Image (cartoon, grey):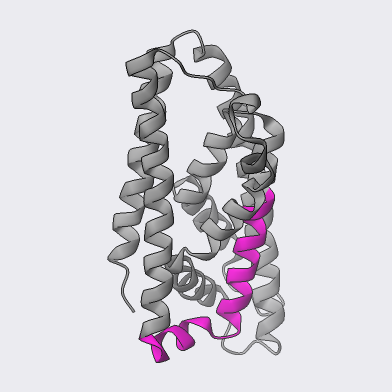
Amino acid sequence: MLGITDFYTFILGTVVILLTPGPNTIFCLTMSAYSVKMAYRAVLGILLGNALLILMTVLGAGTVLKLYPSLFLSIKIIGCAYLSYLGTKLITKAIKYIKFSQLEINPKAVNPIEQKHIFQRALFLSLTNLSAIFFFLSFFIQFVSPQAENPTLSFFILACVYLLFSFCYLNLLIFVGNNIINRFKKFHKFSALMIALVGVLFISFAVKLWFVSL
C-alpha cells in the first residue's frame, strides 16, 4: 500500500512507543496539572517539534550530525542542560512546599510570561531530543518498501499516522492528568512528592540523553 509494508505492525509499534514515558509526555502531563489550556500549548509544541524532527530525518539530519560531531555535541549539551533545568526547578518547588507548606497547582501560580512560552519550551524540548532523529530513521525505514516508487510519500503517510496517534495519546494524558491532580490536590505532601518525582525523571532523561552516541 503506497510503498508501506506491515502497516498494522507499524501501528502496534507506534502505540508501544507512545506508552513509553519520555520528556515530551512528562512535560505535557506536568502542564496538565496547571490547566488544560496550558497542556494544549505543550501538545502543539510537541507535535510541531516531532513533525520537524521527522522532516529533518527524511532530509538526512542523521548524516549531517555524523559529519559534524561538534554540532551533535552542542545540541546534546543544550538538551541535557534544559532537561536538568526543568528537573531542578520542579524539585526545588517541591522542597519549598515541604519546608514552607506552600504549594499552588493552578495557572495563576505560573508566571504569565512563562505561560506564554509553554509552546516554545515544548518545541525546544522536542527539537533537542537527538535520540528521536535516530529513532524515526530506524523505526520508519522498517516499514517502507525498498521498491517503493515514492518513498518520500510513504514516509509522509507514516509520519501523519504517528502524529495522529501521538495527538490522541497526549489528549488522553491531559484528561487523565488533570483529573488525577484535581483529586489529589487535598493531599498536598503527596502532590509535592509527585512533583519531585517528575523532576527526578527529567534529570534522568538528561543523563540518558548524554549517553546517546552517533
Residue at 37% across / 23% down in the picture? 96
Q: Position of 191 compared to 95: left or right?
A: right
Residue at image point 41% right, 88% down? 68
Observer-nearest residue: 202 or 92? 92
From the viewer's perspective, is residue 26 above or below residue 129? above
Identify the image quadrant of the N terminus. Answer: bottom right
Which x, y percent locates residue 143?
55, 73
Q: Nearer the viewer, residue 162 or 184?
A: 184
Figure disc tally: 0
Q: Relative to 159, say whether 202 is above or below.
A: above
User: Residue at coordinates 72% horizontally, 35% vertically from top-left?
Assistant: 37
Q: Position of residue 132 (x, y in %)?
A: 47, 66
The quarter of the picture where the C terminus appears is bottom left
In the image, the segment drawn in magenta is 44-69
Asked if residue 55 lies in the magenta stretch, the reply is yes
Q: Is residue 50 above or below residue 191?
A: below
Where is residue 10 shown, x and y percent of the image? 55, 62
